[in-house]
Amino acid sequence: MIPKPLTEIGLDDLNLLKSNSVREGRTIEYKRDLPGHKDSDKKKFLADVSSFANAAGGDLIIGIKAESGIPTAIDGVSCTSIDAEMLKYEGIIRDNLEPRIQFQMSHVLLPNGNVVFIIRVAKAWNSPHRITFQSQNRFWSRHSTGKYELDVHELRTAFLLTENLSQKIVNFRVDRLSKIINNVTPISLKSSDEIPIVELPKVILHMIPLVAFNPGVNFDLTLVRQNPSLLQPMRSSGWNHRNNLDGFVTHSGNFLKNDSYVQLFRTGIVEAVVEIGDINGQDKTFPSYYEPIVLRSASQYLQVQKQIDVSLPIFIFLSFTGIKDYRIAPSLLFAADNYRYEQDQLILPEVMVGTYADELDQVMKPIFDLFWNAFGLDRSFNYDKNGKWTGGSWHST
């Protein structure tokens, strides 16, 4: 793949492919022309795209002529509307592969007025992907010489690997939640016996990249060690930091008790925990402003993962402990007792970040809505009825 974010690729990068004779292979392929209008052309195009998803991901570059797999000319393709062409082929990919794949499409305008299109396909976490166009039901993957059709044995292996990987993610989350509940954490959030402090509900954020479960994965955390402010704990203004066995941890609180920490694992996983809540006599309320806090911190941690070269996708999980008998927000709208949550833990399903350009408020809206559903409400009221975020600023700086 071209070693740059898709949106930063320009003509110089394409010229390097030619001058360096970068041969087609497992993660890159050249096409002189856009797919034609025949059904057979669409099938071939879908086979190219899905083969990347079922292998290691890669770049399909349209508008470069190649001989024996080596680029020889960057002529581009002629089109009257770049946006229309991109929408057309994005639709073909979206509607004719199952499960849907994660991909981005961009373009480079050439001096001759033609265009080179680049389709970047992410390695799939839920492979294998099949072509559903005209009920074809075929599976493709790639090796060093290009794409090939998976046989029965390879299909069975692909399904088993996906199932095992999903279970590893589940097992990791369950193990970490168990440790947090039992206060077996990188930084203790428990008050001392001499000066006991009321323990508030914990918001637990996990950001788990799929690559974390590859054998031997070990990211270089030097960047964070030199700039610990990149890993600011949730809802904190001052904090401490140190190396530990798992990687690097930051934490905040006061001389009596820590109330927040972030653990960055060497595998690229982020675990962030913060205590949030209010108790006034017998009344326990959980503030709805936790959502911009989570969004702001998740955005910051996502940039850290990007900077240490963690590949996508990344799964985001949100969990809550100690939340029994709490209700949302001290306002008339949510004042009724029947909005109190009746269990100690609230474990929400995952959402997935497919590109680093994703807007997190939209990515995380489904799990925010589920949180409010648990208290008897229709949706998160930090969004308007059209699903637009209205809960205040959250973008990290």
Image: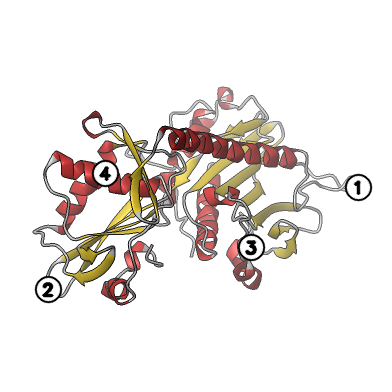
The answer to whether residue 366 is above or below residue 396 is above
Residue 49 x, y percent position in the rendering: 31, 48
Residue 156 x, y percent position in the rendering: 47, 32
**N-terminal-most mark, 4 or 3:** 4
Q: Which residue is mark 4?
A: 46
The answer to whether residue 139 is above or below residue 51 is above
Specify few, some or many for label 3: CA neighbours under 10 Å numbering under 14, 14-19, or 20 or more: few
Residue 41 x, y percent position in the rendering: 17, 45
Q: Quadrant of the N terminus?
A: bottom left
**N-terminal-most mark, 4 or 2:** 4
**Extreme residue toward the front, this view:** 68
> Which of labels 4 and 2 is toward the front?
4
Q: Nearer the viewer, residue 29 or 346?
A: 29
Distance Cα–Cα, label 3 vs label 1? 26 Å
The scheme the figure's colours follow is: secondary structure
Amino acid residing under circle 4: Leu
- 224 to the left or right of 363: right
Q: Which residue is mark 1?
A: 194
| SS state under label 3 | loop
Amino acid residing under circle 1: Glu
Q: Which residue is mark 3?
A: 237
| SS state under label 1 | loop
- 11 to the left or right of 358: left
Q: Which residue is mark 2?
A: 112
